[in-house]
Structure formats: C-alpha cells, structure tokens
Amino acid sequence: MIQVLSFLALAVVVAGYAFWVYSRAELPVRGSRWMATVRASVLVLILALLFDPRLPGTNQPGLSPHWVVLDASLSMSAGPQGRTPWDLAQVRAQQLVDDGWTLVSLGGAADPTGAGPSGSETRLAPVLERAAESGARDVIVLSDLRIEDVPSVRAALESLPLQVEFEAMGDAISNVGVSSFDVPDAPRPGEEVVADVEVHGHGNDSVTVDVFANGAQVGSERVILPAPGLRRTVPVGITVPGEGGRVRYSARVSASTDDFQSDDEAIAYASVGYEEDALVLVSLSPNWEPRFLLPVLEDVTGLPTLGYLRVGPDRFLPLGRALERAAPVDSSVVAQAVRDAELVVVHGLGGSEDPWVTSLAQRPGRTVIIPNDAIAAELVGVSAAAPRSGEWYASGDVPSSPLSGELAGASLLGLPPLSDVIVPDVRSRISAPLELQFRGTGAPEAALHLMDRVDGRRVVMLASGFWRWAMREGDGHDAYRRLWSGVAGWLLEDDDVAPPEPRPTAWVFNRGDAVRFSVPGDTVAYRVVVPEARVDTVLTGGMTVFGEFPPGEYSYRVDDSAGDVVSQGRFDVSAATAELVPPPATFDSVAVMAASAAPGDVGRPLRTFAWPYLLILILLCGEWVFRRRSGLR
C-alpha cells in the first residue's frame, strides 16, 4: 500500500511539472495542453518502470510463480552411493513438481528422472534474475550450495522481488583433487624438469600426487593438504621421456577417502627436444650471423630461443652455450620445433636445397629468410638477379616504413660494409626500411624486404654480413640491435597469424568447452578425422567449431585433397572440475509458501514487457514533432 501511495504522489508531481513547464516556462502556443499531456504521460510511464509493478493475468503459459531450482552440476554427485546430494534433491524436486512448482535447471539439465548431473559450473544469480523477470514470486534452491557467484547471489537477494529458500543437500564429504597442472617444455630428452601441481581437498590430511608421461609414472610426491577452500601448488620433479616430440602428461591424486573422482586427474601437454611458441633459428650454411643474431633476438623478443646448425644431410647441432648444448638431432626434431614456433629464422637458404629445407622457408606464420642466392630469393617471393659483390654501405636516409621509429636514432653512416646484395628486378614492389649504396655513392638498393601476407608476415634479408655491425661495441652494435628489434616488433605485432598446420586450437579443452580446429589458408580444403567422436568432415580456412565432446582422449588426422596426411596428433577434453574447491556457501533464507500452496497469478513485472519502452519512444517523438510544428525548439 505504501508503494502505491508513493507512486501516486510522485505521479502527481511529475505530471504537474509537465503542465507547469508548458504554461509558465514555454511560449504560449496552440496545442500546448496536448503536448503537456504527452510529456506527463512519458514521465509517469518512466516512473512506473522504476516502481516495476506486476501486471495480473500476464504470467507466461506453463510457468508457475513458484519455482524449484535444481542444481544439476557435477558436485551434486559427490558422496556415498544412494546418499549423494543429487539423490536427495531428486526426491525433493519431484515432490515440489507434483505440487505445481516449476522445475528450473541450475548448472546442467534439470530432470529429476535423468541419468545424473552433468554441469561444470554453478551460477545461481542469472537463474534468480530470470525467475524475477518471468513473474516468479517464490523460489526454493535445492543444491549442495557450492555456488561460484556468491557475491552476485547476495546482491540479487537484496534487490530482486523474490522470496528465496535454500535447502542444503547431502552430508559432509571427503575429497581431494587437482586444481591445475603445468609441465614446462624440455629442450633435451632425458633431463629433469619440475611440474607444478595445484591440489585442493578437505576431509583428508595428506594426498599422494603421481605424475605420468605417456602412461608411465615419472614422478611422485606426498603432500599435506591446505585448509578447505584453499589450494596448494606442489613442485614435482620428473624425468622427461628419452624421445622427442609432444608428450601427454597426467597428474593424479589419491587419498584414503575420496567421495568425488571427477577432479582426481589433470592433463597437460609439453614438448621434449624443443619448446613450443619459441623463436627458432635454422642455419643451413656456416656463417657468423647466427652467433650474434640469436642472442639479440632472444633479448628483444623475450621469447625462448632455439638454434640449429646443419652439420650433415640429416644432422643438426643445437646452438647455444657449451654447457647447455644438447647432442645432435635429426631433421624430424627440427621440423617439430619449426612447426610449433612463434617466429622462425631460416639462415643461409640456397636455391639447390632439398624440398624439406625449402618447406621451412615457405611455412605459414612469422618468418625471417636470409637467402644465399637469387634462386632462394625467388622461392620466397623476391625476383632478382645474382647477388652483387663489393662493399655496400648503409644509407643515412631512412625511408618511411614500420621500422622508421627504431632506425631513426641509429648512426648508420660509417658502419662496416655489407656484401652480396640481392637486387630485385622490380624495385617498386619492394618495401625497404633500410637502403644500401655501392661504395657509398651508388643508387640506393634495399637491404631487406617486408612482406605482409595473408598467412603471416615475412622478412627477406637482401644482403649478407650484418654480423659485422655487431662485432664491436658502439654505433655498429646499437644499429644491429635497433634493426632486429624493429624487424621482430613488426613481425610479432601481427595478431592474425594462420597456424602452420591444421590442428586443434588447444591440446586440452576444459569440460563443457567447444572443441575448435584452426585451419590455415582460405581456399585449400582439408579432411579432418576424429574417430573417437565420429567426426569425418572437410574444412577450409579459418576456425571451425565442432561443439562439445565428452571428457576423454582423442586422436585426429588431417589429410589434404590428394589424401596425404598433413598433420596428426591427439588432444584431451578434461574431466576435471573445480566445483569442490570452495566450501558450501551460507545464505539467509526467506520463508516461502507451503509446498502445497496454489500457484495463483501474480503476473509479470512491467519491465519485462517491450510495449512500455516502445510507447515512450512514440510519445517522445510525437511531442518533438508537435513542438517543431508549433515553433518551439
């Protein structure tokens, strides 16, 4: 009653204000009384939306004003058989449904007769908002109260016109689980690395953490559990497998009592023999350039760096410090490192290389090519004649380019000369951020070429001997660092980079997330086969969403149009859930009607209809038209 009287009093005030404006503040014109009525109607309607009354007789068909919210998330399955929160909630929900209450889902499919809970999260606030907007008046929540959005729920209880009662389901349980799991890449097979395993639990004092690599146990640790609701990160030393490639690791926990198994294992993938998302330099001919280039790129990019020097037809020597240098590897290890690299530098590319070597330079993604001859330059998109020998000096005039900011402060005049410059046939097609002159006086020629392609950016170096700039401290070392800092910055600022091969966008997808595949190019068709999920389809460029897969390990194979295997591997959909990390929340329940109360008809709130907003727009536009026609502004 107080709300009704307040609305009427304020409605009189705002309507009176509208008539006062047109009678006192505006010029007297014809139709001012009608315009004042329109404005008063708009203000009263806005006031009604603020008070948000319920309109009787407007309930949605099939919906009762009494809702029972059934928590169908995975945490409801924790507990002894027959006494889980889900078992108890099923019985209670069915009783309320038989008495006319509307059953609504929370976290998963809300079916009291269903097979079991399946949701991976419990967010109650959106359900309470939907209940209020649908005309519900009373809500009973059947849950174990392990709710993720507790602050939002408390705010909704204070602001929404609902009477809510919480019924906690289930008894106290014991649980241990893995919250997160991370294994670093191992550049050398057989070395020791430290995996980070984050554990949680309650009802136990300690837990055993076992780490497996491709199914074989490689580490174990006994851990004291943190307090309920907290997590503890445990370093576990493991020995990586002796062979290179991508390895599937799993961390499992075990304790004397555990009533919930879905969070007992976590999966992670890591590379052995190389690092993923690294900067990889492949040197195909002896030269001083990698000796100076690799440390500079590591410093300016912040990426982990790997270097390989070819010392035989199928033999590569890892570059780096002597104490960190690994044994020679074959081309398969180099190919894996290049395939998963963030940025690739191919040094000393020649025109007579075998197809495997030239494929390194033609990969999608960010690439720097340092060719030895015109044939190699032609392979990467630069048509030119044979390299010109002699002394080529850097020009002091820096052309406008994406590298101008880095090169503007460099002292280029007087630097040691470069040699073997590859001069393009058509100079106008070259984007040259730095120019060279023969003996310091000839016509300027490009020192490098920036190529912005659909499948990633590429930089082609058109001269040799840049390492001479870096041999001594001073202007040369500064210019060398500035040049490669600008090159790396231009390459890495390109966010839209196609993957080097068709593959999943992640190696481990969370439970409930859609499985996605990323395919390079925009016209080439690939056939993707995931036998465990019965997926066999043809994809073109871009990202394709397959939808949700059940938790488990999956293998995939990608074929090109000729039927050749382009890529293959495996990925996981994790079964883990963090629902049992937080302890059950506590809420102040508001008493609701008896379960046998008649549904009644309290109507929907005014704000849930579209017509009030449409009417306000029509009235405002009408008033504006009449004001303009009558001469008012």
Image (cartoon, rainbow, N blue to C red):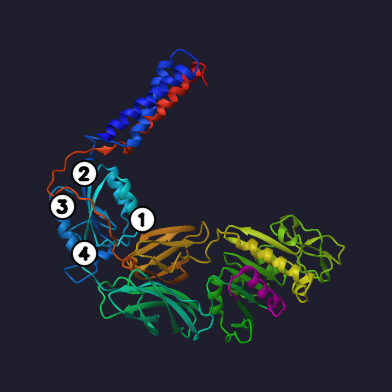
Residue 590 place in picture, x, y as percent: 23, 51
The reply, left or right, for residue 163 in relation to residue 551 is left
> What is the secondary structure assignment of the residue under circle 4?
helix
3D distance between C-alphas at marks 2 and 1: 25 Å
* Mark earlier in primary sequence (2, 1): 2
Name the residue rendered at 28%, 31% in the picture: 5
If the image is split into quadrants, where does the N terminus sit? top left
- The residue that disc 1 covers is 151
User: Residue at the location (16% across, 47% down)?
Assistant: 593
Question: Who is closer to the viewer here, 570 or 568?
Answer: 570
Stretch of the chain drawn in magenta: 285-305
- Taking 50 as reference, is 193 left or right? right
Q: Nearer the viewer, mark 1 or mark 3?
A: 1
Distance of mark 1 from mark 4, alpha carbons? 23 Å
Question: What residue sits right under mark 4 in the picture?
Answer: 85
Marked residue nearer the N-terminal end (1 or 4): 4
Q: Amino acid at mark 4?
A: Pro
Q: Is residue 573 visible?
A: yes
Identity, as a three-letter code, of the amino acid under mark 2: Pro
Q: Nearer the viewer, residue 137 or 184?
A: 137
Quadrant housing residue 238: bottom left
The span from disc 4 to disc 3 (Cα, nearest Å) is 16 Å
What residue sits right under mark 2 in the picture? 65
Left or right of residue 44: residue 98: left
| First in residue order: circle 4 vs circle 3 | 4
Question: Residue 70 at x, y = what percent?
Answer: 23, 56
Helix, strand or loop at mark 2: loop
Which residue position holds label 3? 96
What is the secondary structure assignment of the residue under circle 1?
helix
